[in-house]
Image: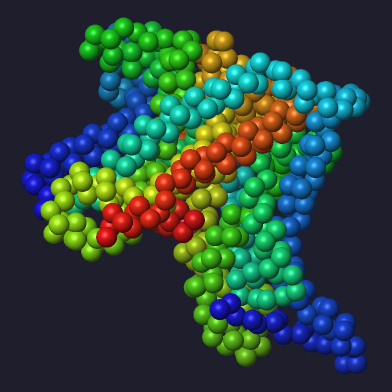
Amino acid sequence: MTTTRGRVVTYVALIVGALLTLFPYYWLAVMASNTTADIYAAPPRLTFGGHLFDNIGQVFAKIDFFGSLLNTLIVAVVTTLLVLFFDSLAAFTFAKYDFPGSSVLFGILLATFVVPTQLAAIPQFDLMAHFGWVGDLKALIIPAAANAFGIFWMRQYARGAIPDELLEAARMDGAGFFRTYLSVGLPVLRPALAFLGIFTFVNAWNDYLWPLVVLIDSNHVTLQVALSQLNGLYVKDYSVVMAGTLVAIVPLVIVFLFGARHFIRNIAAGALKG
Amino acid sequence: MTAILPAPATAPARHAPVSRRKRWRYLPQYLAIAPFFLLFAVFGIYPVLYSLYLALQRWDGVGPMKFVGLENFRFLLSDATFWESIGNTLVIWVMSTVPMTVLALLIALGLNSSVRFKGVLRVAYFLPNVTSIVAMSLVFGSIFSSDFGILNWVLGLVGIDHVQWLTDPWAIRGAISIMIIWRWTGYNAIIFLAGLQALPPDVFEAARIDGAGPVQTFFRITLPLLRPVLLFSVVMSAISGMQIFTESQVLLGNRGGPDGAGLTMVLYFYNTAFADNDFGYGAAIAWGIFVVVVLFSILNWRLVQRPARGQVKETVR
């Protein structure tokens, strides 16, 4: 049905579009591997240079970039593990057990979707000050340790994926509730856990507004905050800023590429159901 | 359909009264869902209620609070900067959503035809959506740089004068919109693609037999059938569009650049509350944003929902 010419046009358009989309990444790598003078020359240097490690070295020497990398890693990993545990446990319970108030409680959980984030920001900051958590990574991890989206999304999955017979069998074998969750629920939920894990990790890694509010003026900043500070410090030395930027996105891009198929499929499926 | 499997009673004490046994029977289930509800009570409900209280106070976050009643809200209504921030947010939303939706639809149609390397292309288009906004705002900041930026250099090659991307009010809004388009086009293309793949093939078969051309098929069949997915996309973009913050803040600073052309609602909120430490008024702005978002969402819903569904059926028939 499609003509050859039509197909060629489609190909070319899709590839040009993809190249345009990827161009900022290429340009980031070019800037990070050249000196600032080379980038700002006329005409600018459009290919990779040999200064990448110099530039990264400067980033590490001038600010505690490694520390912020470590902070971000801690926040992202711990948050992800907590979310996976609490969300899957709650989702498993809501999907497979009926207990007094369960539907009302699930309704409340859904209603929390409409609570806007800015409304809570100032009091949360005040709360963190009372807890003594301002400038502490706990302020990022604890409030994010369980969320309605993950529970809702995983419950939808668990309802279809966990056969009742399996639960019945576990019960016959004398397994208690928690044991059943561990040995029946978790293994079946593995694909859903993979998606929710990547999703949570990516969001925790990229979060900016709340870390900016609660970690500012402390020596425990995350990468995103460190990046914006780096930008403020080195207005003149773009290559150094870009080297830092490159270091900040590479781990995340790797995590995403590993789970991309999974991730993209689930995002699309969620939108269709919604 | 949900299995009704009460947890087995945990080893009841030999002569325990029945009611007591019953009460503890569901304890594991309640414990399992408790973390979310606990966290939500502490970091969700309490803060929202407290922010209503705060909006009635004057408070710098350190000294004593002073009760001012509805003064903050009265000021909000006459605050030109707040109205400008609403205007900026809406303008940037329109400038980004319209091209983004068209581009995403084109990409989805392309990916839905029989091309190879679909997987690689999908990942390439999706990547911007997961990459940190701070990092990419820095990259775009350099791309948009008016004297040394590569964009102006390229524009120069084709004979277009330098655009003052970061100082001219409309160019600022354009720059922010370009960043949003870059971030969200791939995401929406993936959603549209999933929508296209879920459409029944026999409808297209019937159209082909009736002699409909590709353009006719697209406007009379594909587009109407894709409506629910388009609706989802526009509503989502309306919600996230009202939250624009990072692009403006990183690119232009807390004041949103010259004349505040890039000052969005959330940036104004951030600036008032956490840069100027005006917590009482900040809380009032947050409630103002909430009202705008609710009104805008309702309006949006109405506008997209309007044409009747019968129209689609008729076209298909």
Compared across the picture, whether B112 is left or right of A241 comes to: left
Q: Residue at x 39, y 43 (%)?
A: B188
Foreground residue, A240 or B49? Answer: B49
Q: Residue at x 73, y 52 (%)?
A: B40
- Can see residue B159? yes
| A23 in relation to A130, above or below | above
Q: Nearer the viewer, residue A166 or B111?
A: B111
Residue B97 % position (x, y): 43, 33
Q: In the rendered view, tell whether residue B269 sits above or below residue A41.
A: below
Which colouring convention does the figure follow?
Answer: rainbow
Farthest left residue in view: A4
x, y (%) of residue A171?
Answer: 63, 86
Residue sitting at x 71%, y 65%? A104
Work out which quarter of the rendered image holds the N terminus of chain B and state it: bottom right
Can you tell which quarter of the image residue B274 is in?
A: top right
- Horizontal placement of A49 versus A95: left or right? left
Q: Is residue B9 left or right of residue A173?
A: right
The x and y percentages for residue B145 are: 41, 14
Which image quadrant for residue B121?
A: top left
Decide: is B172 above or below B211. Answer: above
- The residue nearer to you, when weighing B177 against A202, is B177
Viewer-side residue, A26 vs A195: A195
Asked whether residue B229 is in view, the answer is no
The C terminus of chain B sits in image quarter: bottom left
Please provide percent x and percent y for residue B9. Answer: 76, 85
Q: Count of labels shown?
A: 0
- Residue at image position (38%, 55%) is B310
Q: Is residue A123 left or right of residue B167?
A: right
- Where residue A23 sits, quadrant-wise, is top left
